[in-house]
Image (tube, rainbow, N blue to C red):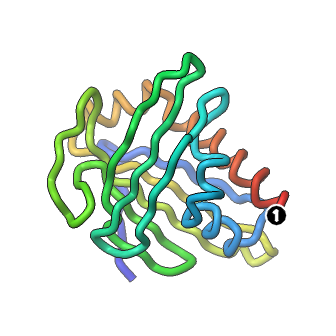
Amino acid sequence: MTVYRVNPELDLVLERTVDVAPELVWKAWTTPELLVQWFAPKPWTTTSCEIDLEPGGRCNTTMRSPDGDEYPNTGCILAVEDGSKLVFTSALAAGFRPQLVEGGFPFTAVISIESDGNGGTRYTATAMHADASSKKQHEDMGFLEGWGLTLDQLVEVVKSL
């Protein structure tokens, strides 16, 4: 298992315990048909998702604003630890191909999913940045609020399964 160390000067972290099983959280993150139901904080929506769950695989989503503008996001899966860890980045496209990130900043996301011992999940989402200004830009965009809202939406979706 790879260890990802948080650098408080460069990384943003959302940690919560939710009352759904880890298997369901993993399923919501790795099943495109489920991910589109929760991945953008409302009133935004996710209109498409492609995930190839292997290192080098694509991790592409398109988000739609309340005004109808679409924002495609392309990325690459870096690591998969089945049921417990998903790592992806916007700095690379599928096949580990470097890419430019227009109008934003590249970051790497580490999603950690663990049992809380009571049927729920200890959930940690870490966004790793190359520099402090990218971290600040992501923070100012509402990382904690937005990723927190999407986690609430994820829980709502998997409870309906």
Displayed quadrant of residue 24: bottom right
In this rendering, is residue 112 above or below 71?
below
Left or right, 69 with respect to 98, comes to right
Displayed quadrant of residue 56: bottom left
Disc tally is 1
User: Which quarter of the rendering shows the N terminus?
Assistant: bottom left
In the image, farthest residue toward the right: 160
In this rendering, is residue 103 above or below 128?
above
User: Which quarter of the rendering shows the C terminus?
Assistant: bottom right
Q: Amino acid at mark 1?
A: Leu
Residue 21's spot in the image, x, y percent?
75, 71
Left or right, 144 with respect to 94, comes to right
Mark 1 surroundings within 10 Å by alpha-carbon count, few (fewer than 14), some (14 through 19), many (20 or more):
few
Where is mark 1, residue-wise? Answer: 161
SS at mark 1 in the image: loop
Q: Residue at x 25, y 55 (%)?
A: 93
Q: Residue at x 70, y 59 (%)?
A: 17
Displayed quadrant of residue 27: bottom right
Q: Residue at x 54, y 37 (%)?
A: 144
Q: Decide which of 154, 124 is in the foreground and name it.
A: 154
